[in-house]
Structures are given as C-alpha cells and as structure tokens.
Image (spheres, rainbow, N blue to C red):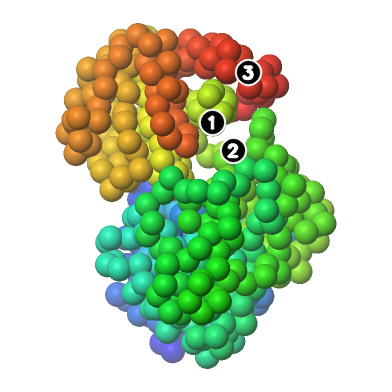
Amino acid sequence: MNKLRFILAIAIGKILILFSRWIGNQGSNFPGKMARRVYPGILRELAARITGRIIIVTGTNGKTTTSNMLAQIINQTGASLVHNQAGANMIPGITTAFIAATGITGQKQFDYALLETDEANVPLLLKEVKAGLILITNFFRDQLDRYGELDYTVQVIREAVKGRGIDLILNADDPLSAHFQGLTAVHCWYYGFAPGSYDSYESRESREGRYCVICGQELQYQRYHYAQLGKYSCPGCGNHNPSPDFTGHGLVMHPAIELMVDDMLLSSPYQGFYNAYNIVAAVSAARLLGIEPRYIQKAIADFKPRAGRMESFTVNGRPNILILVKNPTGLNQSLAAVMENPAVKHLFFALNDQVADGRDISWIWDADIEAIETDRKIKQIVCSGIRSGDIALRMKYAGYPADQLIIKSNLKEGIEYVTSLEGDVSYILSTYTALFECRKILLSLQKRSGAPAGKVPVRG
Ligand SMILES: [Zn+2]
C-alpha cells in the first residue's frame, strides 16, 4: 500500500465533499470517484477498518426505509456506523460515505458499515468489502427494467454470494427469494408475516414473479399479504414458503403501525403494509446483530417518515396519504416514497401560488418529476388547486400519459374523485395554502365512509 497516495486520496475526497456541500450539491458520487482515481483500493482499505459487521441492504422496494431504520437502531445502541445516503448507493457514493466518516489519515475504526445498494451492484461491492450480512427486502419486477430480467438479477446475486461466509436475510413471503440456501450454500434467515386480517385471497397485481423458482410452474396462493408477497405453494414440485425465523403478526395499521415481531411489540408512526415489511426486515437484521429489544423498540417508535407529514385518512376502505410539498427536494422525496410503494395508486396534486406557497411556481420544473414515468402503478393523476393547469402541463412534459391526467381545480371535487377510483392507495400532495382545506375534506370523507375518525394524529 502506498501510504502517501492513500492519504492524498482521502484528502482530495474530503475537500471535494466540503466543496460539493458548499455549492449545495447533495449528490455525493463525485468525491468518491475522484479519490478512487488517485487510490483505487481506497474503499477496500477503509472497509477493512470496520471492526464489527458490514451489512448490505438491497432489493427492489423499501431498501432506503429499511436501511434508515436499521441505522437508527444501531445509533440507538451507541455503536459507531458508516452509512451511505440514498441516491449515493453505487460504488463511488459508498466510497464517499467512508471518506466522509474517516479521519484525515484514514485510520479511524467503526463498529459497523451499513451499505444500501442496488441489486445489480452487489457483486461489485462484494469484491471490495467483506460483508457479513446481506438483507434483501424483495424482488419486484416493476423498476428493474434498467438491468433487464428480474430472474437474471436474482441469479447474479446468487452467484455473487455463493460459498461466502455471509448471513443472508430474505423475505419468506416473496417467491423469488425462495431456495437461496439450496443454490448458494449460504446460511439464509427468513422473515415474513403470519396470516392476518389485512390479507386477501386474490390479487389485483400483475402476475409477474408468481412462478416457481425451481420448476417454473405457476404458483398457487393461499393468501396474499401484499402484492406478490404471501403464502404460496407449487403444484409441480411442492416448493412453498420457507418457514420464517422472524415472524410479524398482530398487525394494526390505523391510525399508525403496531405489530409484533415474534415476542417484541413495536409501534411506528409510519403507514402502509409495505412499511410494516420494512420494519420486520430491519428488526430481523437487528436481532441477528444481537441488539437488545429496548433499543430496537425505541428506534422504531422514534423513526419519522421522511416525506413530510404522511398523515393517512381511510376513505372507502383505502388509505389516502396527505403530504405537504413546497420545494423540489421535498417533492422528489415525496415521489420517491410514492414509488417505493408497489401498490396500485393514484396521485392528487393541489398547486397554489398564494404568498405562503411562494408566488413563483417554477420550482415544479426543478423537481425530478420525470421519475414517475417508470412507475406504471400510478394509474391516474388528478391536478387541482389555483394552478392546476401548470401542474398538469408539468406532468405531461414529464412523460406521464395525457389520457390518465385529469384537471379538477376545485379541491373538493378533485379529492372526491380520486378517493372514488379503484386502487390500493391515493397520495394527496398539496402546497401550503391548500393543505388545511385538503385535510378538512379528507376528514369529512373519512367520517362519511364510516372509518374511525378523530384519532388521526398530526405529525410533522
Ligand atoms: Zn415448483
């Protein structure tokens, strides 16, 4: 090891991190990339200073929420941690996270590293860091077109972990996570849900990912917990869910999530079944790390939804989640949360331009709305508020199909319309001056549809 180049690479990385913060750039791939040019082995060497375990969190949906929850649990214990941020989850971004955390000589030691990364990046990452634990949230086909077929991705991960001394944590309810142990000889731990009152016996989702990984026959589902996740068996070869090592049960979703994981009671201000899965995943990893229940319970209870208020209203038996949006960053985060939910969904967007909203609405053009184009589960977008036409135009330019865009400038008409649509969930996005009115309309619709009212806490 060339000590001088190593220290030079860290110094350059640290200067570039300061510089990109100074210019207000949150994207943190560049410093890591430049440091790697100076000293290509930098990630390998910094990762070798982790005294405990290196944990990788991957999967199609929920990896950001799950890894943030796990980070909060680890922080709660007082242990030290290197953790990359969402959006910087490829090798350069992960390198940046290590450089930011270490001292100028690169000698600082940490108890854990918690690395969130895309599925396709796992083999590359394993070449540079000695991971002890890999958590895979699920394999959903939706947003995977970037890398080609989902089955190929599953295959790539299997090959990458084969024969390594790693603990894998997998979703027992996801048929594509089955049979990993048999094919890789890696020790697999499974988490999943026991049968519960939110299950259904048929699915509204497309049928992808529903074939047996062993013999290819179509699976038979006894019940669906969520999307493709559920209790299944294969009529061809008898393949069925592995029995979970960590079981979620007793789930209550309103007004907020409450559930048991084995004998541990957890409550969270989060909403939605997919977040209940994220909690069970994070808790399973924490248990495997040997973390005491009191730290886990406290961290999950304190973990705040990232996209504003996320208050949920039940109308016609379905959740409607209210989110305040006021700038491009907040809108990007909100849309990321929307897209992280693989359910069939609708958006409602109330855009006002009063003084409290900011008279200039050009910020909607700075937000990365183009991202929604990849999410085919957003079935309709209802544009509302004083500047409903502007938000409709923005959506159209983002590539969203015009025939699924509806303009209803009147808030009440718009919300009544979106809550009447077929689907699993609606997201009600609103700028500041329309927010109070939207909330009032949702509360009255909730009351009218007979759902529990008045108990919905406001969070912010
Ligand atoms: Zn089979």
Numbered disc 3: secondary structure: loop
First-in-chain label (2 vs 3): 2
Residue for point 18% across, 30% down? 402
Residue 153 image-quadrant placement: bottom left
Residue for point 33% across, 16% down? 384
User: Which quarter shows the C terminus?
Assistant: top right
Numbered disc 2: secondary structure: loop
Numbered disc 1: secondary structure: strand
x then y, percent, for residue 20:
35, 50
Above-or-below relation of 451 to 173? above
Residue for point 53% across, 30% down? 318
Dot 3: within a 10 Å radius of its alpha carbon, few (fewer than 14), some, or many (20 or more) residues?
few
User: Which quarter shows the N terminus?
Assistant: bottom left
- Determine which of the numbered discs, if any, sits on residue 450 in the image: 3
The amino acid marked with disc number 3 is Gly
Q: Nearer the viewer, residue 343 or 53?
A: 343
Residue 127 image-quadrant placement: bottom left
Dot 1: within a 10 Å radius of its alpha carbon, few (fewer than 14), some, or many (20 or more) residues?
many
Q: Can the viewer see residue 115 in this picture?
A: no
The amino acid marked with disc number 2 is Gln
Above-or-below relation of 396 to 410? below
Q: Nearer the viewer, residue 271 or 42?
A: 271
Do labels 1 and 2 touch, CB within 8 Å? yes
Instruction: Identify the residue under disc 1.
Output: 319
Mark-to-mark CA distance, 1 and 3: 13 Å
Above-or-below relation of 141 to 304? below
The amino acid marked with disc number 1 is Pro
Instruction: Identify the residue under disc 2.
Output: 271
